[in-house]
Image: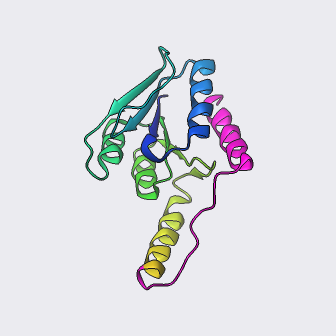
Amino acid sequence: MKIWVDADACPVAIKEILYRAAERTRTHLTLVANQYLRVPDSEFIFVLVVEPELDAADEKIVKISAEGDLVITSDIPLAAEVVRKGAVALSPRGELYSAENIGSILNMRDFMNTLRSSDIETNGPGALTPSDCNNFANHLNHILNE
């Protein structure tokens, strides 16, 4: 298993959890971003810089991820694409995306987009909390130890 991170929007606290997990489990971790990111010096942690175009990181992750890989993203369409390929997707808040739930999550995302485009105010997600980080770490550990 390799871990691919949609890194441009990934919170620093989640990246730190990922760095420690990659070292502990000796798992290849690649942060995909449209600019260089500073990461710990490690034989398991890499940065892949893509073009600055919109969705370039997402497209690259879809192209290079494989069945059984883990993708960290809060981007629902990206999660849907990699789940269809047989990868596992996990949000920075610890929400596990699966073949069983990705359809309803996509539908809810589209519904919320429709509301926003109709000038109906919706509240986006709140700030990342310690509980979110703990939930993420627990799911990550479970996935890596399967």
Asked whether 91 or 130 is in front, the reply is: 130
Q: Is residue 115 left or right of residue 51?
A: right
In magenta, the rendered stretch is 117-146
Q: Position of residue 125 (x, y in %)?
A: 59, 62
Q: Against 67, is 113 above or below? A: below
Residue at (63, 61) in percent of width and height: 126
Q: Position of residue 54 (x, y in %)?
A: 29, 53
Chosen colour scheme: rainbow
Q: Is residue 8 left or right of residue 133?
A: left
Residue at (34, 37) in percent of width and height: 35
Q: Quadrant of the C terminus?
A: top right
Q: Position of residue 30 (x, y in %)?
A: 43, 29
Q: Is residue 142 left or right of residue 29?
A: right
Asked whether 16 or 1 is in front, the reply is: 16
Q: Against 105, is 19 above or below? A: above
Residue at (55, 58) in percent of width and height: 100
Residue 28 in magenta? no
Residue 130 in magenta? yes
Residue at (42, 24) in percent of width and height: 46
Q: How many marks?
A: 0
To which quarter of the image does residue 65 belong? top left
Asked whether 123 or 68 is in front, the reply is: 123
